[in-house]
Amino acid sequence: MPDKETDLQFLSEYIKCLKPIVEAIQSLQGEKNTYYGMLLPELMRIVKILSSLKMENLKYCGHLIEVIERNLKLRFKQFLLFDSTANDAILASVTHPFFKMKWVPKEKKEHVKALFLMETRKLKQNENDRKESSTEKKKRDESYFMLQDDSSDSSSTSEETGDLEALQYLQDRDTSFSMLKSYPTVKKIFLKYNTCLPSSAPVERLFSYGLIMRPCRRKMGDSLFEKLVLLKARSTSKEYCN
């Protein structure tokens, strides 16, 4: 006969180990308020929880924590090391009003801040370049050197205004999305990088798994699938109307 107390302790430790991963998956699979900028904070949260669990010296699932941690670092290596390939994810998280830089480890804060400032400067400079090109058409009689001076000044100004807006945004305690209206450059960066994570959950809810695995459904073409989705959505809307 198995020891009931031992089983319960094992299950309790097992739940502790997997709970942060399950919560992260549920958060990232949501249909509403799901942004790319949530990925890195979720990963950092999992790493912190696993580190705290290792300090508890779990009796049965200590090895499980090591396996999860090792595979997490292997799968999301570029994100956890703040590699240049993860810059999009970093900017997505920093421009998310709820997270900003609160999730960033101390040793990476300067790197992330510099990356954010560089992005705001680049966007400001692009805006100034477009303005200059339209102004240049109206002032073709200006001297060549005058145009060069204007360009130099505007470059310096774009850096200053970009830095000022970015720093004010980071210091702002407001965490609502409406606060982005006060920071137009940051808002543009947010919209650029915070694309929704693709999820199959909405499609899976339209069709049950049992029906999809039938022979008549396994080889559906794109056009037929589109028609079925529209018919299903229409039938659902009729039910609500009735």
Image (spheres, rainbow, N blue to C red):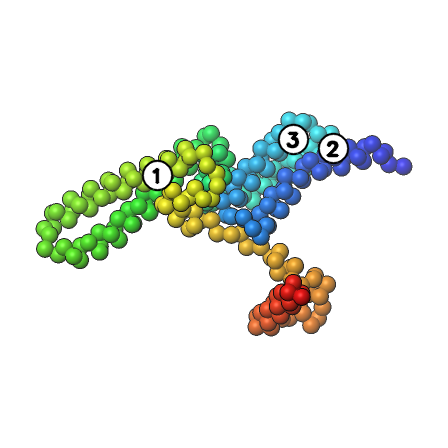
Quadrant in which the N terminus appears: top right
- Pointer 3 local density, CA inside 10 Å: few below 14, some 14–19, many at least 20: some
Image coords of residue 214 (percent x, y) = 71, 68
Q: Nearer the viewer, residue 134 or 177?
A: 177
Identify residue type, mark 3: Leu
Q: Quadrant of residue 202?
A: bottom right
Answer with mark 3 or mark 2, whichever residue precedes in sequence: 3
Residue that label 2 marks: 60
User: Can residue 234 be seen at all in this image of the molecule?
Assistant: yes
Residue that badge 3 annotates: 53
Residue 14 placement: quadrant: top right
Cα distance in 3D space between marks 3 and 1:
40 Å
Residue drawn at (56%, 40%) of the image: 42
- Provide the secondary structure element on which disc 3 rests: helix
- Label 2 or label 1, whichever lies nearer to me, is 1
For disc 1, the neighbor class at 10 Å (few under 14, some 14 to 19, many from 20) is some
